[in-house]
């Protein structure tokens, strides 16, 4: 599933695994502990763009990682109540999102994760060989 070769493009491969495979599995299991170490706690922030391209409409809704964790867990619990014909919950999540573009400049990365009708831009930093999410711009229109 991962479009990035682990040998030829290890950084993009690792970021894809984190943001697609691991995040989706953790979300379906409602298990924050699976992804907790993927974040940089001290500098994390989440911006919700409200499906608008106008930055005047964007808001910092997750000033702390704990705020994002709580919203993520709430969304995961809600998702767990849904049923999908002909596919597992994991397959349903994976079929609704894609990550094909990851820009890397030195130790900084920007991952463009697309959902059905929106996208999230994840900002990452490489810390001692591990990529960590430092923030995101979410609910951007496609």
Image (cartoon, rainbow, N blue to C red):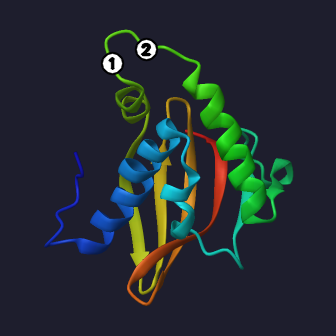
- State the SS at label 2: loop
Q: Name the residue under label 2.
A: 84
* Residue at the image point whose x is 69% and y is 70% from the top: 44
Q: Horizontal and vertical percent for residue 41? A: 67, 74
How far apart are labels 1 and 2 at the CA level? Answer: 6 Å
Q: In this view, does 12 lie to the left or right of 125?
A: left
**Residue 52 or 109: which is nearer the viewer?**
109
Is 42 situated above or below 119?
below
Q: Which residue lies furthest to the left in this view?
A: 7
Q: Horizontal and vertical percent for residue 50? A: 76, 40
* Residue at the image point whose x is 47% and y is 73% from the top: 109
**Residue 107 or 79: which is nearer the viewer?**
79
Q: Is residue 60 left or right of residue 140?
A: right
The N terminus lies in quadrant: top left
- State the SS at label 1: loop
Q: Mark 1 points at which residue?
A: 87
Dot 2: few (<14), some (14–19), or many (≥20) neighbours within 10 Å? few
**Residue 10 or 25: which is nearer the viewer?**
25
Is 36 situated above or below 40?
above
Quarter location, residue 65: bottom right
Is 108 situated above or below 113?
below
Count the numbered circles shown. Answer: 2
Residues marked 1 and 2 touching at CB (< 8 Å): yes
- Please give the label number shown on residue 52: none
Q: Horizontal and vertical percent for residue 55? A: 78, 54
């Amino acid at each position: 599933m991962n479009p990035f070769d682990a040998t030829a493009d290890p950084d993009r491969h690792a970021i894809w695994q984190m943001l697609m495979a691991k995040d989706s599995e953790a979300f379906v299991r409602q298990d924050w502990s699976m992804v907790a170490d993927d974040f940089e706690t001290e500098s994390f922030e989440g911006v919700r763009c409200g499906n608008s391209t106008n930055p005047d409409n964007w808001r910092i809704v997750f000033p702390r990682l704990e705020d994002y964790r709580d919203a993520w867990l709430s969304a995961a619990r809600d998702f767990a109540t849904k049923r999908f014909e002909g596919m597992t919950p994991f397959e349903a999540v994976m079929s609704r999102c894609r990550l094909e573009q990851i820009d890397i400049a030195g130790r900084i990365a920007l991952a463009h994760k697309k959902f059905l009708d929106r996208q999230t831009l994840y900002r990452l930093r490489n810390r001692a060989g591990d990529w960590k999410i430092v923030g995101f711009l979410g609910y951007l229109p496609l």
